[in-house]
């Protein structure tokens, strides 16, 4: 049902009289108000943000040849069968496997990597190819690399000559002469003998900030454009793991990317409707890279760590309290990694990785969305240790997976008594829930813990349904709900939509903020809602009222307002969820405005409208509007999220 039902009885020219009061409310909009939640779901990291194009480049998946095929004949053996295990001096615990190829100087053999649902190859773009190889017989003359298209035609090629009997890295470039959506990498050999190979890697030369082996440029650009206040990483349920052994361990994701231990992804077979048994984590995108990304996009880093409880929707495996010390130490060591001097153990590692300057970590999360006494018992231990050594660090705690109910109430009661810093709330609900809950935080305790609305998204069908859509109905309801978040910025200090990314051919969960394939990406209507809030956050909250009350759905209208002191500007956000245009007469109290301003409009007459790779039917449009020094009179079209920006004279 459309969210417009509440306003269906409005007349075509319903007049709404509002008062915009410039009186100082004493409430500041925190720089962290609108941020980003990242989780490696929907191929969000490997195959997505992390620009590596080769799947299972180190042969470390549970099935070591997953992602690789030998179309003509079997010429491979794993290292434990090859008799060459003594030459793996460069290998560490995280990278145990390599393969031996028997080369017989024929042109019929090739080794092909399928990439992540194919490889996106762009005409004219250069790609950096590298391989680790040991040529003990000295009889293999060349390793050839080719990009091939869906029909097998070659679109780029190059080669290296493996000159050393010992392990050595070889690099070369290829430039594509054709754009291919689902290409593959073909590796072949010349000579007669055996050769050992490992870490077969391909990256586009052009990455974000042109970092070698870096991040996909178009995806990071979309994050940057959100103007995010924080970046929460690495999740999400993958923090917890299906079992404790499969939890995310940050120390295994730093140091040389060649040495990082591959781990199966929690989302590989979580949902029967989208099984992805080839979903693993290479951790090429690890904690150092997350911190670096946060710095790049101007966001506060917010790492979330395991609290010693595996996902309670899966095994709910517990670490005994007496054995919790290593988990707590991980948190303390992470703070040292982020902020410590280069003379400390973990600060030195950060420096050795190329960042001597501290990352200035201020926030850390304990657990993802655990619940019940087991979580509270563990939170207490973490809190005592973290604040005992780093009292300035703010700790994010959790109220469970739901916005209400027994677990939610218990968690909040306990965390309030413990004087927790910030409590994370999650809600995946219908569009109607979001519009009805625009006043959710109006009566929260102003002296209690602050709120992090850490995961939310309107579900067009039902939570976990594969049929959920990123349609305008959902996005509009989120815009209405967010007026309530902003209006209660003295309580709600952090917010983020979730999940962030989805590969069009590799998703497990819908809806998602940004969709991409191997070549391109597009912004959803929900993305534009987040962007308009993030780029128009302001600095100080002021009130906008109708008949002395907050605008929380009267006639299907929702509103909040802020002042941006840095730009001497007032910013009014108005959402019309009704099916008719409505007039907004905004009387200004306690200030004067310029005689013109801007109105940014995000709208569509079809609540089922979605964006796609070929068309963005819901995107912001900016216009100039005339205003009076003491009033703003304008019309808000049906099904519209509008932002009005006027200079303060």
Image (cartoon, rainbow, N blue to C red):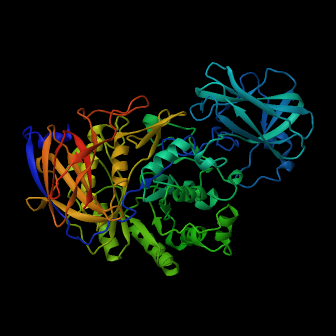
Position of the N terminus by quadrant: top left
User: Residue 278 is drawn in which quadrant?
Assistant: top right
When the figure is inspected, residue 123 is found, relative to residue 410, above or below; the finding is above
Position of the C terminus by quadrant: bottom left
User: Residue 76 is drawn in which quadrant?
Assistant: top right
Seen from the viewer's position, the closer of residues 629 and 32 is 629
Q: Position of residue 249 (x, y in %)?
A: 58, 59
Q: Residue at x 32, y 71 (%)?
A: 449
Q: Is residue 601 left or right of residue 278?
A: left
Can residue 404 be seen here? no
Q: Position of residue 398 (x, y in %)?
A: 38, 63
Q: Is residue 535 left or right of residue 542?
A: right
Q: Position of residue 290 (x, y in %)?
A: 55, 56
Can residue 394 be seen here? yes
Q: Position of residue 523 (x, y in %)?
A: 41, 40
Q: Residue at x 68, y 75 (%)?
A: 343
Q: Residue at x 37, y 73 (%)?
A: 420
When the figure is inspected, residue 306 is found, relative to residue 508, above or below; the finding is below
Q: Is residue 520 left or right of residue 617?
A: right
Seen from the viewer's position, the closer of residues 280 and 172 is 172
Seen from the viewer's position, the closer of residues 206 and 286 is 206
Q: Is residue 230 left or right of residue 324?
A: left
When the figure is inspected, residue 280 is found, relative to residue 409, above or below; the finding is above
């Amino acid at each position: 049902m459309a969210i417009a039902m509440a306003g269906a009885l409005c007349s075509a020219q319903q007049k709404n009289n509002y008062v915009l009061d410039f009186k100082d409310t004493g409430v500041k909009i925190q720089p962290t108000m609108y941020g980003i939640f990242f989780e490696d779901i929907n191929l969000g990291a490997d195959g997505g943000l992390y620009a590596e194009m080769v799947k299972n480049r180190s042969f470390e998946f549970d099935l070591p040849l997953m992602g690789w095929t030998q179309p003509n004949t079997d010429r491979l053996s794993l290292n434990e069968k090859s008799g060459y295990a003594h030459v793996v001096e460069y290998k560490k615990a995280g990278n145990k496997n390599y393969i031996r190829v028997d080369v017989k100087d024929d042109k019929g053999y090739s080794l092909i990597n399928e990439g992540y649902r194919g490889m996106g190859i762009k005409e004219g773009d250069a790609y950096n190819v590298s391989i680790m190889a040991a040529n003990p017989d000295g009889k293999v003359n060349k390793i050839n690399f080719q990009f091939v298209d869906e029909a097998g035609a070659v679109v780029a090629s190059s080669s290296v000559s493996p000159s050393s009997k010992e392990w050595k890295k070889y690099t070369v470039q290829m430039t594509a002469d054709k754009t291919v959506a689902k290409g593959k990498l073909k590796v072949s050999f010349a000579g007669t003998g055996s050769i050992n190979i490992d870490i077969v890697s391909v990256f586009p030369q052009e990455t974000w900030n042109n970092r070698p082996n870096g991040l996909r440029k178009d995806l990071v650009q979309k994050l940057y454009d959100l103007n995010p206040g924080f970046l929460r990483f690495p999740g999400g349920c993958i923090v917890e793991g299906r079992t404790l052994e499969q939890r995310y361990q940050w120390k295994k994701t730093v140091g040389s990317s060649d040495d990082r231990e591959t781990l199966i992804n929690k989302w590989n077979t979580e949902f029967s409707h989208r099984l992805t048994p080839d979903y693993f984590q290479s951790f090429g995108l690890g904690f150092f890279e997350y911190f670096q990304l946060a710095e790049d996009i101007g966001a506060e880093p917010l790492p979330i760590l395991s609290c010693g409880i595996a996902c309670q929707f899966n095994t709910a495996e517990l670490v005994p309290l007496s054995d919790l010390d290593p988990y707590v130490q991980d948190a303390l060591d992470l703070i040292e990694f982020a902020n410590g001097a280069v003379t400390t153990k973990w600060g030195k590692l950060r420096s050795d990785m190329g960042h001597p300057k501290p990352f200035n970590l201020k926030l850390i999360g304990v657990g993802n969305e655990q619940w019940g006494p087991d979580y509270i018992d563990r939170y207490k231990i973490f809190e005592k240790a973290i604040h005992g050594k780093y009292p300035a660090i703010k700790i994010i705690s959790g109220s469970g997976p739901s916005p209400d109910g027994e677990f939610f109430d218990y968690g909040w009661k306990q965390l309030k008594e413990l004087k927790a810093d910030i409590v994370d709330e999650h809600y995946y609900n219908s569009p109607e829930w979001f519009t009805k809950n625009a006043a959710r935080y109006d009566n929260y305790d102003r002296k209690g813990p602050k709120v992090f609305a850490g995961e939310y998204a309107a579900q067009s069908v039902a939570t976990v349904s594969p049929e959920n859509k990123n349609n305008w109905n959902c996005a509009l309801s989120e815009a209405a709900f967010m007026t309530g978040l902003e209006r209660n910025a003295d309580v709600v200090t952090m917010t983020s939509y979730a999940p962030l990314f989805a590969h069009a051919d590799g998703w497990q969960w819908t809806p998602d903020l940004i969709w991409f394939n191997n070549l391109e990406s597009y912004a959803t209507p929900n993305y534009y809602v987040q962007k308009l809030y993030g780029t128009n956050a302001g600095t100080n909250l002021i009130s906008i009222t109708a008949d002395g009350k907050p605008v929380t759905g009267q006639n299907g209208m929702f509103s909040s307002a802020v002042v941006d002191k840095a730009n001497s500007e007032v910013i009014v956000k108005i959402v019309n969820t009704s099916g008719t245009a409505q007039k907004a007469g905004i009387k200004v109290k306690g200030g004067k405005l310029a005689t013109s301003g801007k109105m940014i409009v995000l709208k569509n007459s079809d609540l089922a409208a979605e964006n796609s790779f070929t068309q963005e039917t819901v995107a912001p449009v900016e216009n100039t509007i005339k205003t009076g020094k003491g009033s703003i009179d304008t019309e808000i079209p049906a099904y519209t999220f509008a932002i009005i920006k006027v200079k303060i004279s």
